[in-house]
Amino acid sequence: MAAAAAERPQEPEPDPEDWSSELAQIDLQLGRLSWQRAQEGVYLERAFGHPSRSRLTAYADLQSYLQALTALPAGSDPTSAAVPLRRRDLLAQCDLLLGQLGWDAQQGRHCLDQLFGLSSRQHLNDTQLLEFNMQLEEKLLAAKPSAGAGQASPAT
């Protein structure tokens, strides 16, 4: 029975109350990038729709922001630098794709189980959620009839 419990996915960890370590790491990354507050504001506006780090109220957004900054090469331009994945956008896209496929929750869970061995999107990290969405897009494209299929070709 212990083996079965070990195979069950764990619930996601609760958000920490103290974000000071992450905020300090963000400051270090901004220094590495040589970005001043105005440049950070430009990037935050593009990525999160507001120019202030203090308005990042979801821990997942703070983590995404830190990961994105860490991945940027020194000297990156905040007006064109890659922006982070946003979990709520990925989940909204997933909902849309599931709806377009006409799938119910059980079909979505079955697909998750086949691809990742998990029963809930909440157990996926952002990269896995993006991959899941891409798999759903492929299934949607495969389900659509190809353009011109079933039409008679003109007589020659």
Image (tube, rainbow, N blue to C red):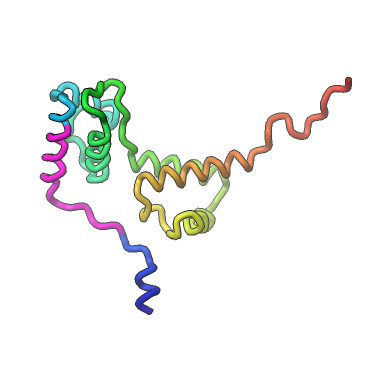
- Residue segment shown in magenta: 12-29
Of the pair 64 and 50, the residue shown nearer to us: 64
Outermost residue on the front side: it is 74
Name the residue rendered at 30%, 57% in the picture.
12
Q: Is residue 6 above or below residue 50?
A: below
**Residue lying at the far right of the rendered structure:** 156
Residue 21 is inside the magenta segment: yes
Residue 85 is covered by the magenta coloring? no
Check the picture and name the quadrant holding the N terminus: bottom left
Name the residue: 15% across, 30% down. 32
Rendered image quadrant of residue 21: top left
Judged left or right of residue 117, residue 156 is right
* Residue 113 point in image, percent of width and height: 48, 59
Residue 121 spot, x, y in % from top left: 40, 53
Query: Compared with residue 12, is residue 66 higher up or lower down, i.e. above or below?
Result: above
Viewed as shown, does residue 89 lie left or right of 13?
A: right
Q: Quadrant of residue 87?
A: top left
Quadrant of image for the C terminus: top right
* Image vertical order of residue 84 relative to residue 98, above or below: above
Please state the horizontal and vertical placement of residue 54, each as a whole percent of the image: 15, 35
Q: Is residue 119 above or below residue 88?
A: below
Q: Position of residue 128 (x, y in %)?
A: 40, 48
Q: Residue at x 53, y 53 (%)?
A: 104
